[in-house]
Image (cartoon, helix red, strand yellow):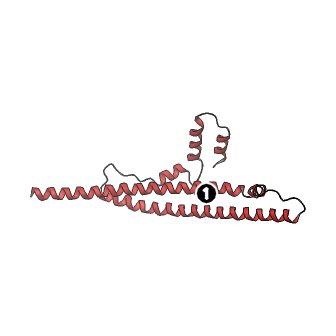
Amino acid sequence: MSETAREVLENARGGEVYEELRKIISEEDTIAGRTPIEWKEYFSIHLTESPGPMECIQADVKLMGLHHEATFYHNIAKLCLDTVLISSDTRFRQKFQMLYDQYKESTVRMPAASTLENLAKQETLQLDKLSSNAHRELEFWKKILTDLDMKRRLIENASTNNGIQVKMDLAGRTLNT
């Protein structure tokens, strides 16, 4: 989330906050180098109201490439999230063990496990923010892939309708001759 978006949330007043936040996120935040609005345009497929067979074929080829690219970005986002989660867990365990060992070796009374957990958790705060961003990006790519799947089904429907129309036209010609 951008600093501007954080400022809007911190200065939240009334119903216009959501609209302002939505505008900032869609126009300023970037995912893989583009804003959500730029990705929307990039992943759009424009068809006429009644697409013909060639238009369906061209849209299908474009869709295949877009789906391939979105899958790549989705996989990268998943890899980043997994890496951050593993790093966070490892750092937490190392810090917890270090604190435990320090108190065990010293003459100071061992604090409660929850206190040690809270102290160790402080070490992972930055990674938790990264994890949140990675989750957000992964969800973005999941939604892009879902949208592309819906477009694929719509193109398939148009192609099926084209095939039915051709059969109906051929059947009509056969009856008239």
Question: On the rendered structure, is 105 left or right of 130?
Answer: right
| Secondary structure found at label 1 | helix
Name of the residue lying farthest toward the top: 14
- Residue 31 showing in the rendered view: no
Residue toward you, 98 or 106: 106
Kind of residue at disc 1: Ala
- Residue 169: x percent and y percent? 19, 56
Identify the image quadrant of residue 62: bottom left
Query: Image point 39% across, 62% down: which residue?
Result: 61
Q: Is residue 2 above or below residue 65?
A: above
Residue toward you, 124 or 64: 124
Residue toward you, 17 or 53: 17
Query: Image point 64% across, 34% down: which residue?
Result: 13
- Residue 38 showing in the rendered view: yes
Identify the image quadrant of residue 65: bottom left
Question: On the rendered structure, is 138 left or right of 169?
Answer: right
- Residue at the disc numbered 1: 134
